[in-house]
Image (cartoon, rainbow, N blue to C red):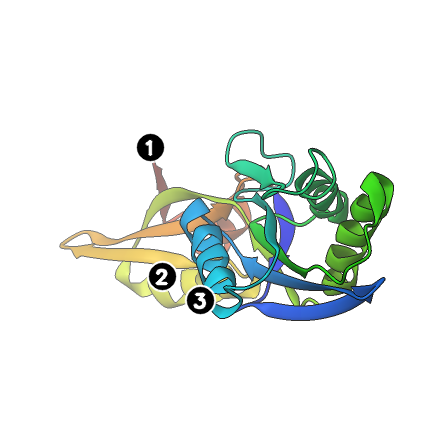
């Protein structure tokens, strides 16, 4: 499976702000490959804005469509007016591994349930517009053996296809390579085996 994720280093976030009826809505987005990354973002938002009215949140700590490592919170806003609308925007973006917090400073004018849902959704949508992204490719380990003379050729073939070599183990018979094969592609090393004139042995895990 291949999907976009926020292209942000660990511990960093993208921050944007909108104003609705004098209420400030500050949106924070981070890369959240695990729930702990989202929790760190939420802690940072609370530390930086201790006097804010609310810190509402939503996260998907996995691929798009993830059903377990997800969550959202209204943080004191009327039920269903903040966390769920935020989550729906994240879900609709097609992003995975993403965490979001929207910090609100109440401006004195009540927005009503519909107005709140629109404001929180808008805050997240605007933040997503400028969010840098990169593609994640889910991979499975694949092991094969080549002769010493074939290692450079094998590495070059893999590099042409952006397939990473995760480990190389050497013994008297040659080199055992462990690679990260894309899960969305059928395993096919026959073109490489042809290049190596058959001197390739696939090893079952």
Residue identifier under label 2: 150
Return the disc, 1 or 3, that comes first in the chain's sequence: 3
* Residue 51 visible, this angle: yes
The CA span between labels 2 and 3 is 41 Å
The span from disc 1 to disc 2 (Cα, nearest Å) is 20 Å
- Regarding mark 2 in the picture, which secondary structure is present there? helix
- For the residue labelled by badge 1, is the local secondary structure a helix, a strand or a loop? loop
131 left or right of 193 in image: right
- Say few, some or many: other residues with alpha carbon within 10 Å of mark 1 (under 14 / 14 to 19 / 20 or more): few
Mark 1 vs mark 3: in front: 3
Helix, strand or loop status at disc 3: loop
Q: Nearer the viewer, mark 1 or mark 2?
A: 1
Q: Nearer the viewer, mark 2 or mark 3?
A: 3
Instruction: Tell whether 156 sits left or right of 172.
Output: right
Which residue is situated farthest in the top direction here? 67
Q: Position of residue 93 (x, y in %)?
A: 75, 49
Q: How far apart are marks 1 and 3 (CA)?
A: 38 Å
Q: Where in the figure is residue 43, as x and y percent of width and height?
A: 44, 58
Is 193 displayed left or right of 3 in the figure? Answer: left
Residue 152 % position (x, y):
38, 68
- The quarter of the rendered structure image containing the C terminus is top left
Q: Which residue is drawn at 83% across and 49% down?
A: 111
Q: Residue 94 or 43: which is nearer the viewer? A: 43
**Residues at discs 1 and 2 in contact (Cβ within 8 Å):** no
Marks 2 & 3, CB-CB < 8 Å contact:
no
The answer, for residue 197, to whether it is visible in the render is no
Q: Which residue, given by chain and number where applicable, does mark 3 sit on? A: 11
Q: Nearer the viewer, residue 167 or 176?
A: 167
């Amino acid at each position: 499976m291949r999907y976009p994720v926020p292209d942000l280093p660990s511990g960093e976030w993208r921050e944007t702000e909108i104003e609705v009826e004098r209420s400030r809505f500050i949106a924070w987005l981070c890369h959240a490959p695990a729930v702990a990354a989202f929790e760190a973002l939420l802690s940072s938002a609370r530390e930086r804005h201790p006097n804010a009215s609310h810190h509402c949140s939503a996260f998907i700590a996995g691929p798009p469509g993830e059903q377990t490592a997800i969550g959202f919170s209204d943080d004191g806003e009327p039920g269903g007016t903040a966390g769920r609308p935020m989550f729906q925007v994240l879900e609709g973006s097609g992003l995975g591994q993403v965490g979001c917090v929207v910090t609100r400073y109440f401006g004195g004018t009540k927005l009503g349930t519909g107005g709140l849902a629109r404001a929180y959704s808008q805050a997240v949508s605007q933040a997503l517009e400028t969010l840098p992204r990169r593609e994640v490719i889910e991979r499975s380990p694949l092991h094969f053996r080549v002769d010493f003379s074939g290692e450079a050729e094998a590495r070059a073939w893999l590099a042409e296809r952006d397939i990473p070599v995760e480990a190389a183990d050497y013994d008297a018979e040659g080199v055992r390579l462990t690679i990260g094969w894309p899960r969305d592609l059928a395993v096919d090393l026959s073109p490489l085996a042809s290049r190596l004139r058959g001197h390739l042995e696939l090893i079952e895990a």
